[in-house]
Amino acid sequence: MGLRSSSSPGLGVSVDRSTRALRLSELPQSLSLVLGDLLSAALALQLTSLFLGATGRPALNWSDSLIWVGFWILWRAYQGLYPGYGRSPQTELRLHTVGTVQLLGAQLAAAFAVHQLAPSALGLVLQWGLILVLALLIRYGLRSLLIRGGQYGRAISVIGAGQTAALTISHLRSNPAYGLNPVVAYDDNPALHGTLLEGVPIVGTLDDALNAPRTAQALISIPGARAEVLQRVVNSVYAAYPSTWVVPDLFGVPNQALQPHNIGSIASLEIKNNLRSVQARFVKRMLDLLLSVVGLTLIFPILLIIALLIRLDSEGPAIYRAERLGRDGKAFPCYKFRSMYQNAEQRLVELLATDSDRRAEYEKYHKLRDDPRVTRVGAFLRKTSLDELPQLLNVVLGQMSLIGPRPYLPRERPKMGEAAQEILLVSPGMTGYWQVNERNESTFERRLDMDRFYIANWSTWLDAIILIQTVRVVLMGKGAY
C-alpha cells in the first residue's frame, strides 16, 4: 500500500488552518444549542420562582442563579456537548445528567458554606431538576430541527470500503443525531472506484485521501489490515486530517464498556463486564420496582377500560398468560392483554398450511403483518403497544425487567442456537434495544444480534436511552403490528 510522506513542512500549518475552519463551521450549531440551554434554564428559573411564590417560600436570587447557569454552560462546553458530534445517545445522556447534578451539588455546597442553605435548598433542587428535564427536551428538539434543515453534522471521509465501513456508514446515516455524515470513501482496490458504499461514493485511493482531503475528519475502517500497515495508515491520516477516528479489530467485544488506559507509551483498553456489577444490577432492579409500581398505580383506570373493550369485542378473558423464557432459561407466565381470537393457534396452523407466502413471512419474522388471528381491538393495542402493559406485573414479580432482551417463546430456543447462552443470562424486558431500533421490521437473526449487543454493552445509561426511545416509537406507532 503506497503512502506519501507525512513530513511535509507545510502540513502542520494546513492542519491547523483546517482545525480552525472546522470549529468556525460548527459555531452556528453550537450557538443554537447554547441558546437552547439558556432558554431551558430561564424557563426552569421562572417556573421555580412561580412555585416558591405560590407556596410562600423565599424566592431565588436570579443574579446568583444566572451566574451558576453560566458555570453550567461552561462545564457543558468542556464536556464537548457543543455541538457534541460523535457522542452516542447514552454517552450524551450521561454527560448531561452527571454535569447537571454536579452543578447542583456545587451550588448547594456554596450555599451551605455561607449559611444560606435552609431558605434556598428546595428552590435549588427544583430549579436544577427542571433544567435536567427541559434542557434535554429542548436539545433534542433543536437538534431535530437542525437535522431536518440539513444544518447539523460534520462531513467525514471513510478510509476503507469493506464490510466494516459499510456497517459504520449505514449506522451513521440512519442515526443523524451522531452528527457524523460520511460523504466520500477511499479504498486501494481500483475495482471499487466509482461505485457506492451504502450511498457514499468511493472516489479514489488512500493516497488521494491524503493528497487532497475533502473533509476535516477521517474515519479509518480497515480492521483486517496487518498491524504495521494499519500503523502507517493511521499515522499518515492523522497528519493530514484535524480529526481522525479508527475502527479497531474488536468485533464481538463490548464496545460501550471500553475504557482507554496507557501503560507508558503502550495503549490499552479496559473491558468492564457490567452484567457482573452487583451495584448496577441492584440499581436496575430498584428502578424496575419503582417505575413499575408507580406506572401500575397511575394507569390502573386505563387498564380497566382496555379490559372492558376487549371483553366487548370478542369472547374470552381480557388478559392471558403466554409462556416465555426468562432468566436462566426458566419458563414463566408473561401477562398480556388478549389481542387475538381464542382459537388463534388453530387459525395459524390452517393459514400456514395453505398459504406459502404467509408461511415464508412467518418463518422469517415469526410474525405476520396482516394477521387474521388479531381482533379489532387487538390490532389497535398492538399498534400502540398497549397490549404489553400487564407485563408491569411481571416486572414487579421479578420475572421481567422494564428493559431487556425480547421474551422468547420456548419453541424458539432451538433456533436461538448459541445466542441463547448469552440472552438467557438476564431477565427479558418489556422493551429493548431491537424494539426501539427496528421493532417488527427486523428478522429473527437480527433480533438475536441486537439482544446480544444490549447484553454485552448493558448500562443504566443505555437503559435510560431505550426508555426515552420507547416513548418516541410508541407515539409514532413505528414498525408495530
Image (cartoon, rainbow, N blue to C red):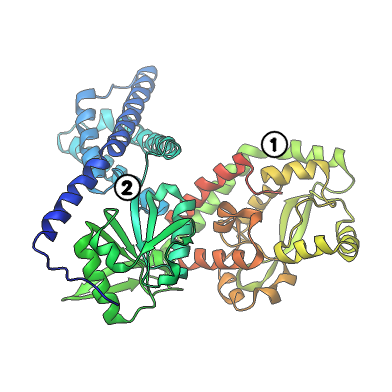
Residue 458 visible? The answer is no
Q: Residue at x 17, y 55 (%)?
A: 15
- Where the N terminus falls, by quadrant? bottom left
Point out residue 107 in the picture as x, y percentages from the top left corner: 22, 38
Q: Badge 2: few (under 14), some or many (20 or more) residues near its Cα, within 10 Å?
A: some
Please report whichever mark, 2 or 1, sits nearer to the chain's N-terminal start: 2
The residue where tag 1 is placed is 302
Query: Could you say whether the residue bearing mark 2 is in a helix, strand or loop?
Result: loop
Does 441 sit left or right of 342 as displayed? left
Q: Residue at x 81, y 37 (%)?
A: 309
Q: Residue at x 81, y 60 (%)?
A: 358
Q: Residue at x 44, y 68 (%)?
A: 192
Residue 84's disc is 2
Q: Quadrant of residue 207?
A: bottom left
Point out residue 118 in the picture as x, y percentages from the top left corner: 26, 31
Q: Quadrant of residue 326?
A: bottom right
Does 148 sit left or right of 379 as displayed? left
Q: For marks 2 and 1, give the one nearer the viewer.
A: 2
CA gap between label 2 and label 1 equals 40 Å
Residue kind at label 1, given as amino acid type:
Ile
Residue 105 visible? The answer is yes
* Closer to the camera in the image, 470 or 321: 470
Does 406 sit left or right of 361 as displayed? left
* Closer to the camera in the image, 120 or 378: 378
Point out residue 180 in the picture as x, y percentages from the top left corner: 37, 52
* Closer to the camera in the image, 460 or 457: 457
Q: Quadrant of residue 403?
A: bottom right
* Closer to the camera in the image, 65 or 479: 479
Residue kind at label 2, given as amino acid type:
Gly
Residues at circles 2 and 1 in contact by the CB criterion of under 8 Å = no
